[in-house]
Image (cartoon, helix red, strand yellow):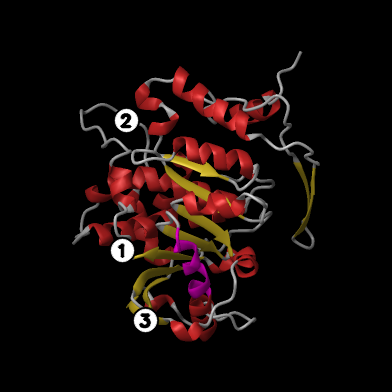
């Protein structure tokens, strides 16, 4: 008799993903599968998803949290994990899980919002510290707001020497064919900070890169950097060979060749927000896009892996003078977005959602050999 969920686990194992701590939340709720047909001649795809009649229940989510806490050591329990990520599915169960593990020393909660799944998404969102949106859903989910109430000022115009045409500049600023400017976008995204735990909001824009919005001050709330420092151990310096980490020195050397970024300050009444606008990663002339399936998910995965790894490495970078925690956080977010953008771009050369995803070794090799 086959154990339900074993097919998913075996596929992850085939991709060299560690599955020791994977738990099957429920034997009564099947996993959704999506079949993807890619037309190489038109660069289009058709997705057919299996029908899910049963949602994962809050009771199952509560039991899942208890099983983790009962079977793992206290230092590895779910409540002591650094990050818990939600994909905005099974929102009733996700809401229960978020409530179970939320607390002063609880994990950083992140969520990928690609589709409105009522009625619990609106209750889950305010509990999350980092919110990922794709731009198309963000524009439909968030109510429109008057751009007259906000003022956006560019305070850092980085890598301008690489902007060699008016078209590239317009794309970076977000003035797309629909006429929606960067100010309109960030004025809508800022609503996610109202009455919520949000520290950072990220809007992905496909081939046009991403926008990151960060509230400058959240009174009574620890910063994202402070939360990470209390949840991630420092890098060991005992002379022993440690697990491979992202080569930040290599990234620092090539980032001006790969990315264009700008930093803005958004003032909305008494509130201020930092805005980072990052282009998509430039690729080598021989690069060919085969399939965009899973690129957004890969961006988020790269962002979160970098968030944990780079926090511990950040202060080891040479020739970077960090004046305060706020500047450290902005640099961290920029590096996370660069890693996310780069691994998402690399994944486009493979067919399917995971075939083109680079390993950490492959990512570091690409950084070393880039251009």
In the structure shown, which secondary structural element does the residue marked by tag 3 occupy?
strand
What number is the disc on residue 44? none
160 or 217, nearer to the observer: 217
Q: Which of marks 2 and 1 is nearer the N terminus?
A: 1
Q: In this view, does 31 lie above or below 195?
A: above
Residue 287: x, y in percent? Answer: 59, 59
Residues rendered magenta in the picture: 185-195
Please state, as top left, top right, bottom left or bottom right, where the N terminus lies in the image: top right
Residue 56: x, y in percent? Answer: 67, 35
Residue shown at 67%/52% (left/top)?
118
Do the numbered discs 2 and 3 sit on residues whose CB atoms are within 8 Å? no
Q: Is residue 192 left or right of residue 26?
A: left
Prevailing SS of the magenta stretch = helix
User: Is residue 156 inside the magenta stretch?
Assistant: no
Dot 2 corresponds to which residue? 242
Instruction: Tell me the mark number nearer the camera, choosing from 1 and 3.
Output: 1
Dot 3 corresponds to which residue? 153
How far is the residue under mark 1 from the one under mark 3?
Answer: 18 Å
Q: Earlier in the sequence, mark 2 or mark 3?
A: 3
């Amino acid at each position: 008799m086959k154990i339900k969920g074993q097919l998913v686990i075996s596929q992850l194992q085939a991709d060299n993903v560690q599955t020791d701590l994977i738990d099957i939340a429920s034997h009564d709720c099947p996993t959704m599968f999506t079949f993807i047909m890619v037309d190489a001649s038109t660069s289009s795809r058709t997705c057919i998803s299996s029908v899910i009649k049963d949602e994962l229940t809050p009771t199952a989510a509560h039991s899942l949290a208890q099983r983790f806490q009962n079977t793992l050591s206290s230092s590895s329990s779910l409540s002591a994990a650094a990050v818990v990520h939600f994909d905005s599915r099974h929102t009733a169960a996700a809401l229960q899980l978020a409530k179970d593990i939320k607390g002063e020393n609880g994990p950083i909660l992140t969520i990928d919002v690609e589709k409105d799944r009522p009625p619990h998404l609106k209750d889950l969102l305010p509990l999350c510290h980092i919110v990922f949106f794709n731009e198309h859903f963000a524009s439909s989910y968030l109510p429109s707001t008057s751009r007259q109430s906000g003022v956006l000022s560019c305070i850092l115009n980085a890598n301008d020497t690489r902007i060699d045409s008016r078209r590239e500049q317009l794309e970076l600023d977000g003035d797309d064919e629909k006429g929606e400017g960067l100010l309109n976008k960030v004025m809508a995204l800022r609503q996610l900070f109202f009455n919520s735990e949000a520290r950072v909001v990220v809007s992905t824009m496909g081939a046009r890169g991403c926008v990151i919005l960060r509230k400058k001050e959240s009174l009574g709330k620890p910063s994202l950097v402070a939360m990470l420092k209390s949840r991630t151990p420092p890098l060991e310096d005992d002379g022993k060979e440690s697990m491979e980490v992202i080569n930040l020195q290599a990234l620092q050397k090539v980032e001006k060749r790969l990315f264009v970024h700008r930093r803005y300050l958004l003032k909305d009444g008494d509130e201020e927000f930092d805005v980072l606008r990052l282009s998509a990663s430039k690729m080598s002339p021989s690069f060919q896009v085969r399939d965009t399936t899973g690129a957004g998910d890969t961006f988020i995965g790269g962002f979160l892996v970098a968030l944990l790894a780079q926090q511990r490495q950040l202060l080891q970078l040479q020739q970077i003078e960090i004046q305060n925690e706020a500047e450290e956080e902005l640099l961290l977010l920029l590096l996370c977005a660069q890693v996310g953008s780069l691994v998402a771009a690399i994944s486009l050369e493979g067919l399917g959602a995971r075939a083109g995803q680079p390993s950490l070794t492959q990512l570091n090799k690409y950084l070393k050999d880039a251009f």
